[in-house]
Image (tube, helix red, strand yellow):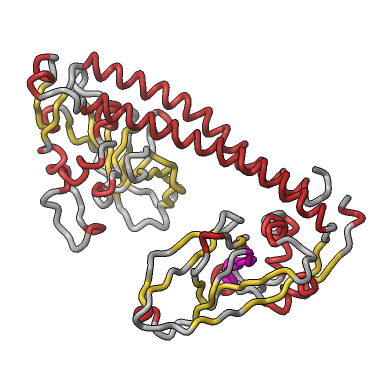
Amino acid sequence: MSADWPRVPLGEVLQLQRRWVKVEATETYHEIGVRCFGNGIFHKPPISGLTLGGKRVLAIHPGDLVLNNVFAWEGAVAVAGPTEVGKIGSHRFVTATPVSGRCETSYLRWFFVTKSGLDVLRKASPGSAGRNRTLNLDQFFTSEILLPPLAEQRRIVERVEAIASRIAEAKRLRDEANAEGSRLLIQMAHRADLADSEKQANGWRLVTLGEALTLASDPVKVDSSASYPNLGIYSFANGLFHKPPISGLETSAATLYRVRAGQFIYSRLFAFEGSYGRVTPEFDGLFVSNEYPTFDCKQGTLRAEFLAAYFKAKHIWATVAVGSQGLGDRRQRVQPKQLLAHKIWLPPIAWQDRIADVWAKLDSAGALQSETATELDALLPSVLNRAFAGEL
């Protein structure tokens, strides 16, 4: 049990490693990064020695405990594995290895994302948030932790990693189900399996969106004493999300625009990366700026669910954006006239109703998945805290 484990300074069980690499201009290098909250190592795109220039870099070896000294306080800790052979890290990375077999780096990696472990990292990273909270190595290595025998460390790691693996698999299956749902909606909205003549024979019509959509506008004059619930649109046609309310006192906008359930909406600035969606009931009555054109669907002709499914197809975003003005992708606003001029094969309303039914089922499943995701996100921290308290 944890009450029987000794308190040990990290400097007694870990030794700092500084394998500095001489950068050659003609060589290619592969840098690593470390995600926060114990979410592992990632690889950056290859970079030439010429581009690295005088940047100080060090070699990463499998088995290293690797910390990002700027974000260690947020749990940016990982263990290097076989895929990190030949990789480098900048001078902002700390690498350490066990002393005399007294600890397992994988044990420490998991420990440092527990509440107790994060407390150690935060106390050793004085200062305010962000880049001012750099890990102080002297404080880090003099920090004391409870350290069980090596056999117990391995048992804890084995138990925690088995549970973490099952949680990761559950999340993978959830993401896969979401992707399958998107593919189904795209297939139903586009029916790429049918020739144009077959679509026409089945009641589909080639129209401009202007024949089925009307630009909606519900302007509200901003009151400095009021607060306005706000929404945003995810990229890749992944729906809407709640943003912090807009303060009437702080915004520079003189007018905001109210949206209504059943409308179609997009972001002029981010249309090129799929910022399209439909207003569902939970967003009814919220507000947006004039950067978010909103449209009413002509009743009996067009359903927002069909159009949202149609705009899930990536190739459509570039087609609509042709002729956009601005400097660079992120300044190329798509104007409402471009959207309304876009030609589309519009299916009979009965087929759109079927798409709406699929959306309803996916929304229902998504609500359950959201609850499950919250539970899964809370499960691992709970498991870790119990394991490192000797209760698991």
**Residue located 67% across and 73% down the image:** 126
* Rendering quarter of residue 208: top left
Residue 356 horizontal/vertical position (percent): 32, 21
**How many callouts does the rendering have?**
0
Residues shaded magenta: 63-74
- Quadrant for the C terminus, please: top right
Q: Is residue 287 visible?
A: yes
> Is 198 on the left or on the right of 178, as rendered?
left
Is 382 covered by the magenta stretch? Answer: no
**Residue located 83% across and 44% down the image:** 391
> Is 318 on the left or on the right of 80, as rendered?
left
Residue 78 horizontal/vertical position (percent): 61, 61
**Residue located 61% across and 79% down the image:** 18
Residue in front for this viewpoint, 116 or 33: 33
Residue in front for this viewpoint, 63 or 281: 63
> Is 222 on the left or on the right of 143, as rendered?
left
Residue 209 horizontal/vertical position (percent): 14, 32
> Is 16 on the left or on the right of 355, as rendered?
right
* Rendering quarter of residue 314: top left
Residue in front for this viewpoint, 152 or 354: 152
Q: Is residue 221 above or below residue 28?
A: above
* Rendering quarter of residue 260: top left
Residue 85 horizontal/vertical position (percent): 52, 66
